[in-house]
Image: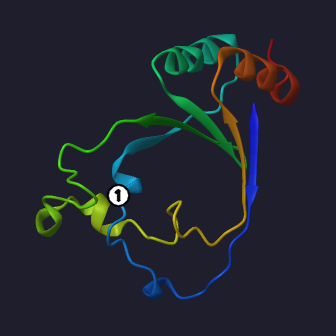
Amino acid sequence: MIFVSKTKSSDDEDSFSCDGCDICCRYINIVAMPPKDMQDIDRMIWYIYHGAVIYVDNGVWRVNIDIPCLHLGSGYCKIYNDRLDICRKYSNLTCERYNMSEINVTVLKTKEELLEYAKEELGIS
């Protein structure tokens, strides 16, 4: 289990550019319901077995899967002018490159890490 904590500071979103950056185009990150029993934990283990990483960020559970967008070029979006609304609305203040808020994230990469976290933090065993 990995616990990540970092802080950055800035207040001007316009000073940051996505030029040459494709970090957010290399994965999907889906909010998941927090597990409430072993059946839910079993589902999360299934995600891990398929290459996903589970993130717990201030009580919000996320399933992260490294899979690049089909329209990703070498550091750029091949359909930038016609990109999806979700891409247009993505703020560079929430990306890994320029995140400006304090981050306290638990990273669960293995079955054992998930089971330990479930037992210690959720009381599920």
- How far across and how far down the image is residue 64, in percent? 49, 37
Residue displayed at 69% across by 11% down: 38
Up the image or down, 95 lies above or below 12; here it is above
Up the image or down, 77 lies above or below 118; here it is below
- How far across and how far down the image is residue 88, in percent? 28, 68
- How far across and how far down the image is residue 39, in percent? 62, 11
The colour scheme applied to this rendered structure is rainbow
- Residue at the farthest front position: 74
Q: Quadrant of residue 19?
A: bottom left
Q: Is residue 7 left or right of residue 54?
A: right
Residue displayed at 72% across by 65% down: 102
SS category of the residue bearing label 1: loop
Residue, disc 1: 22
Q: Is residue 84 left or right of residue 107?
A: left
Residue displayed at 47% across by 23% down: 51
Is residue 108 or residue 90 the one in the foreground? Answer: 108
The quadrant the C terminus occupies is top right
Up the image or down, 113 lies above or below 16; here it is above
Q: Quadrant of residue 109?
A: top right
Is residue 91 or residue 18 the one in the foreground? Answer: 18
Q: Count residues near mark 1 (Cα–Cα under 10 Å), then give few for <14, some for 14-19, many for 20+.
A: some
Residue displayed at 54% across by 20% down: 48
Q: Total of numbered circles in the picture?
A: 1
The quadrant the N terminus occupies is top right
Up the image or down, 118 lies above or below 104; here it is above
- How far across and how far down the image is residue 87, in percent? 30, 61
The amino acid type, in three-letter code, at marker 1 is Asp
Q: Is residue 110 left or right of residue 119?
A: left
Q: Is residue 83 left or right of residue 117?
A: left
